[in-house]
Amino acid sequence: MTFEYIDIEDPVFKATCRERNEEDYVLVRCNDYANVPINLPNWTPDPVCLSRRFEQIGQTIKDMEVRPDDVWIVTYPKSGTTWTQELIWLVCNGLDFQQAKDVPLDARFPFIDLSGLRDLPEPFNPLRDALAMSSPRFIKTHLPPAFLPNALWTVRPKLVYVRRNPKSVAVSYYHHSVSLHCYRGSLDQFVRSMMNELVYYSPYHKHLIEYSELRYPNMLSLCFEDMKRDLPGAIRQVCRFFDKSYTEEQLAALAHHLDFGQMRQNTAVNRRQWVEYNLQQTNRPDRVNDNDMQFIRRGETDGWKRELSGELIEALDRWTLDRVPKDSKYAILFQ
């Protein structure tokens, strides 16, 4: 059995999951991981928090065809995924800004595990779309290494991984969950669930560590905070990885396109229709213009300082230190 589905027994979760709209949450263990090229002695992947809907697609993803000219992006949620998707797609497609504005990012770069989290309105089916796409395909996922297609490790297409500071992730992921996953709990509740590894795709620290230890020769690792500090440098790094060359003028135009103000206004990437759909479905249409309900919200590196209480900041720091001691070689991943 490739995947094992384990009920969450945490008493606080069981007592309160209904009020937060988390009744379908489940821990999923992958038992087919022997071919993952990971540099961790005696590695056994931890169960991952997902939805029971993952049963409908998990094996299909595990068995899917992988093509040499695929481009895969993997992140823990809310780590700069959409921003980096747009960057990658444009670099690989001749900086075709017009197509990037005319064709939704979801169609150009499908999120294959989305239907494993929530019901989707017809005809939206990103996994089906990805399987049927002509090459070269651009594919997004948040899954940890053990859950990826077995063929990935032998075909070895280009793979990009992006990480982000845990406090920024926690705040951004909370607002994302409220607007797109109809989460009904508070920020405090969400952050504490994340620290208990009971939000989708957790455990968070293991996600970053496992990807950092992949022995995968065709992989680029990026950091959201580094990209924010030096976007032109990140653009050049991506161009080198994909063997693309552009003029300084072209690179400046790309940096302008990727400015967060521009991204927020770009209907091809801001997923406004999804936000509107979810708010209508959950009787919150009055919040459609609320900044915290937007898919692309602020894109800041330290916005968490305004939103997290001192108690939560201390708790998140302690959580990371518990998982990753200060003198660990992995500590740099969480700064």
Image (tube, rainbow, N blue to C red):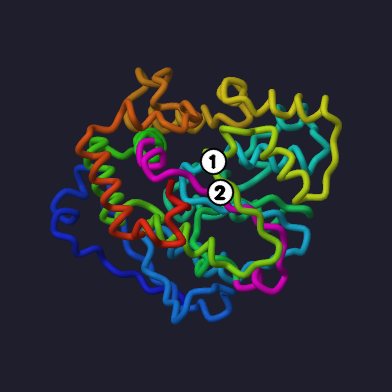
Amino acid at pointer 2: Val
For residue 141, which numbered disc appears in the image? none
- The span shown in magenta is 150-171
User: How busy is the neighbourhood of tag 2: few (under 14 within 10 Å), some, or many (20 plus)?
Assistant: many
Residue for point 63% across, 30% down: 268
**Is 19 situated above or below 302?**
below
> x, y percentage for residue 55?
43, 65
* Coordinates of residue 60 in the picture (x, y in percent): 56, 67
Residue nearest the viewer, comparing 256 with 133? 256
Relative depth, front residue between 334 and 266: 334
- Percent of width and height locating residue 98: 77, 27
Reply above or below: 272 against 196.
above
The quadrant where residue 64 appears:
bottom right
Identify the residue shown where x is 43% and y is 50%. 334
Residue 169 is covered by the magenta coloring: yes
Which of the 4 image quarters holds residue 213? bottom right
Would residue 55 be found to the left or right of residue 19 on screen? right
Res 146 visible = yes
Element under disc 2 = strand
Which residue corresponds to the image point at 33% horizontal and 32% vertical from the top-left? 282
Q: Which residue is mark 2?
A: 162
Give the SS element for disc 1: helix
Residue 224 numbered mark, or none: 1
Asked if 105 appears above or below 51 in the picture, the reply is above
Q: Is residue 220 magenta?
A: no
- Whether residues under marks 1 and 2 lie with C-beta atoms below 8 angstroms apart, the answer is yes
Three-letter amino acid code of the residue under disc 1? Phe
